[in-house]
Image: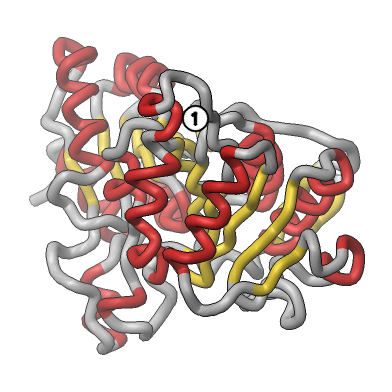
């Protein structure tokens, strides 16, 4: 095992797949000469050259369309967005072309493409640069949505995404690129669509994904000090979602708290709460409780940011609510 940063795990995944398959290439803003806005592609231009590590203009719709066309013609592009907030400009290509091409062509054209970049809040970047897009894209048939929370998951899932025959949206976080974690020395892949139980527990199930997994796990540690054993599940993949792992856990713990950075309306937690009440209603001893970002654009003010986003204290309060322990 080796300890690497999150950014290094992503770099290794892309580099290994580019060595393995000459059809894989990386394109995006500042990915080449600058080694990536967050140094995720550091050293890749030197190894693979400008034909496979391509700096693009600041034109997300344009270079995303080039990527979709390349994928339709047998290549396997990795398209990096500096932030998923900028990818709003590319949504037409992602939603109306990448997602729909297989169905609209009667199965003639697969679109094996990965779209990746920073997602969610990243400090005082204000409302237009602090959005979590998992629910937005998970609503679209034909897209797969992946949100890793550790370097180990990031490398294994990104390698699987690059080899996938369908478009995969890989959502990271600027605040995770420096996180460190252990990964194996040899090659490994993780299956898309499989959640992981990060912590065993018997009293309540906490489900989360992405960087707010840190808050979920911290809450579980805080709850343990009070004698409450929380089971913590990392979804890892938002679409397709592993409902089975969550349902099995809820049938043991009888309570569910879902934590996500997205807004509460039409969210991942909304979908998960529906599926649990549909498939495990008789096992629930309390209504499902969700911990989301406040239903407002994220402010610039640091105290208001703290008040808006999920944190461990809010998760602890939510757990006590489903356990009827709040006074």
Q: Is residue 234 above or below residue 65?
A: above
Colour mode of the rendering = secondary structure
Mark 1 surroundings: few (<14), some (14-19) or many (≥20) residues within 10 A? many
Image quadrant containing the N terminus? top right
Element at label 1:
loop
Looking at the picture, does residue 230 appear above or below residue 61?
Answer: above
> Which residue matches tag 1?
195
Residue 61, image quadrant: bottom left
- Find the residue positioned furthest to the bottom: 301
Q: Nearer the viewer, residue 319 or 227?
A: 319
Whether residue 120 appears in this view of the structure is: no
- Image side of residue 276 versus residue 22, left or right: left
Work out whether residue 271 or residue 202 is closer to the camera in this orientation and state it: 271
Q: Residue at x 33, y 29 (%)?
A: 203
Q: Residue 134 location, x and y as percent?
A: 35, 49
Relative to residue 317, is residue 122 drawn left or right? right
Task: Give the answer, above or below, for where 299 lies relative to 282.
Answer: below
Q: Decide: is 131 above or below 231.
A: below
Res 80 → quadrant: bottom right
**Residue name at image x 62 percent, y 47 percent:** 70
Residue 97, image x, y percentages = 40, 43
> Can the viewer see residue 42 in this picture?
yes
**Percent position of residue 88, x then y:** 34, 64
Residue located at (79% from left, 71% from top): 42
Q: Nearer the viewer, residue 259 or 236?
A: 236
Q: Determine the residue positioned at 35% across, 56% down.
A: 91
- Tell me the quarter of the picture where residue 106 sits: top left
Count of all numbered marks drawn on residues in the image: 1
Question: x%, y% of residue 101?
Answer: 42, 34
């Amino acid at each position: 095992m080796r300890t690497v940063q999150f950014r290094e795990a992503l770099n290794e995944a892309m580099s290994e797949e580019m060595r393995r398959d000459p059809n894989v290439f990386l394109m995006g803003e500042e990915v080449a000469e600058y080694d990536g806005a967050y140094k995720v592609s550091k050293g890749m231009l030197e190894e693979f050259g400008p034909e496979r590590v391509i700096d693009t203009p600041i034109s997300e719709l344009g270079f995303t369309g080039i990527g979709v066309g390349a994928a339709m013609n047998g290549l396997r592009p990795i398209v990096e967005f500096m932030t998923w907030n900028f990818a709003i400009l590319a949504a037409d290509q992602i939603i109306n072309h990448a997602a729909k091409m297989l169905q609209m062509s009667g199965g003639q054209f697969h679109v094996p493409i990965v779209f990746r970049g920073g997602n969610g809040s990243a400090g005082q970047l204000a409302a237009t640069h602090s959005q979590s897009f998992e629910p937005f894209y998970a609503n679209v048939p034909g897209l797969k949505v992946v949100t890793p929370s550790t370097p180990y998951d990031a490398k294994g899932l990104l390698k699987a995404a690059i080899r996938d025959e369908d478009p995969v949206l890989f959502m990271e976080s600027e605040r995770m690129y420096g996180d460190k974690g252990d990964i194996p020395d040899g090659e490994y892949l993780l299956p898309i669509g499989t959640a992981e139980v990060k912590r065993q527990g018997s009293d309540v199930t906490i489900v989360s994904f992405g960087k707010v997994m840190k808050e979920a796990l911290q809450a579980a540690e805080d709850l343990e000090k009070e004698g409450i054993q929380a089971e913590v599940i990392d979804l890892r993949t938002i679409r397709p979602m592993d409902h089975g792992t969550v349902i099995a856990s809820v049938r043991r713990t009888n309570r569910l708290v879902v934590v996500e950075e997205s807004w509460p309306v039409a969210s991942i937690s909304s979908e998960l709460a529906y599926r649990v009440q549909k498939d495990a209603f008789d096992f629930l001893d309390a209504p499902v409780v969700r911990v989301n970002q406040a239903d407002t654009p994220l402010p610039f003010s640091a105290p208001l940011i703290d008040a808006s986003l999920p944190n461990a204290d809010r998760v602890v309060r939510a757990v006590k609510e489903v356990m009827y322990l709040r006074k």
